[in-house]
Image (cartoon, rainbow, N blue to C red):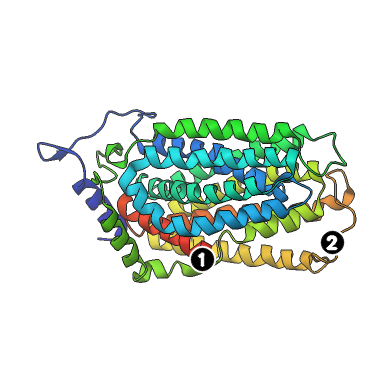
Amino acid sequence: MDEEENGKVAAAASATTVGGAPEIPKKSLFRYNSPLVQVGLIGVVCFCCPGMFNALSGMGGGGQVDPTAANNALTALYTTFAVFGIMGGGIYNILGPHMTLFASCSTYGLYAGSFLYYNHYQHQAFAVVAGGLLGIGAGLLWAAQGAIMTSYPPHDRRGTYISMFWCIFNMGGVIGGLLPFVLNFHRTKAASVNDATYIGFMVFMAVGMIISLGILHPSRVIRDDGSSCTSIKYSSVSTEVVEILKLFLNWKMLLMVPASWASNFFYSYQFNNVNGVLFNLRTRGLNNVLYWGAEMIGSVFVGYLMDFSFKSRRARGLLGISVVALLGTAIWGGGLAKQLGYSRHHEPEVKLDFKDSEFAGPFVLYFSYGLLDAMFQSMVYWVIGALADNSEVLSRIWISSNTVILLL
């Protein structure tokens, strides 16, 4: 019996039963307690909150002419994220998705509001404090999101569900990129975005905070075969501390360290030193639309490879890793070639507009960065999801992996 068959047997054993047999839910494409609907909801929450945050960050310097405030805010953000990232999985297991997601989503709107304040008063203290609070919120949100994404889907369709989530989530970056592009289209000489841009981000983030209340506890989510995603009812602080610390002695989790090293750190470089340095304000917004659109394409492609390319799950995993490795080497090689032409001490004197003839080459590179990011992240989601089937365990694995990312 292979890994996939073992997973199906375990799922059947954990199912809600009636007279010893799994209770099969009524067939419905949009059954509210189905993994499909719940993964879709967490995708919408991430569309509204981290998706809009990505669009805001992707403009370079938080949409400001001077990136100092944004850089300091991000430093505070990742400092607190590293601390609360360790505790995020445990907090999720204790509080459940409602409290965890609602509290975390509230910090995103505060962060966007801090740059609206900065637009008028040029005082960065508010932005730095908001960044620190967002780090706490992000640690909680990604713990909850990781547990949901890796444990709710059926065992043989994880790649498909991950790509669906990634498309919904990154649509936030697409819409978020349209905001500065449309609202600042005629401001070709402007350096900082207008107030309406930040207000638009805040509205979306508030909507995401409300929608987060619709996410069900994993024990209430039933797959089509009648199996429950987990049987956990509650946890305790002491249990979570011990179980999270044990993960750092788990050889499977330690094998994820190279993937952690390769993830997320490049965002500051791509947003600030590629998009922010090479392009003018309105073109940065357009680039973000297409960057996050590329993420959607990349996630669908990898989802297909991981679910449908071969019958063996091992073969699918090896193929996905190989494809991502080859494309990653080629794209970052192109990035190195472009970077050799400028530095932070010798930036290009003229920023490119999308109407310029020289726009195509740098844009293709930036687009490829987005494509690769989604392919890599989706592949990592799939691998982590293959390590366990229980959301209690996966929430700890996922947030511990994120913590390694931040510490590195």
Q: Is 299 placed left or right of 36 in the picture? A: right
Find residue 260 and report its horizontal and vertical position in percent: 50, 64
Question: Which quadrant of the view contains residue 98?
Answer: top left
Q: Is 355 placed left or right of 305 in the picture? A: right
Find residue 63 and report its horizontal and vertical position in percent: 73, 45
- Nearer to us in this view, 66 or 7: 66
- Nearer to us in this view, 97 or 114: 114
240 to 44, vertically: above or below: below
Instruction: Give the alpha-carbon distance from disc 2 to disc 1, as whole Å.
Output: 30 Å
Nearer the N terminus, badge 2 or badge 1?
2
Amino acid type of the residue tagged 2 in the rendering: Glu
Name the residue at the left extreme: 19
Q: Is residue 376 visible?
A: no
Residue at 62% of width from left, 54% of height from top?
Answer: 74
Residue under label 2, please give it: 347
Total numbered circles: 2
Residue at 77% of width from left, 51% of height from top?
Answer: 66
Residue at 60% of width from left, 40% of height from top?
Answer: 52
Residue under label 1, please give it: 407
Find residue 312 and report its horizontal and vertical position in percent: 38, 59
Classed neighbour count for the residue bearing mark 2: other residues with Cα under 10 Å, few (<14), some (14–19), many (≥20): few
Find residue 266 and report its horizontal and vertical position in percent: 63, 60
Foreground label between 2 and 1? 1
State the SS at label 1.
Answer: helix
Amino acid type of the residue tagged 1 in the rendering: Leu
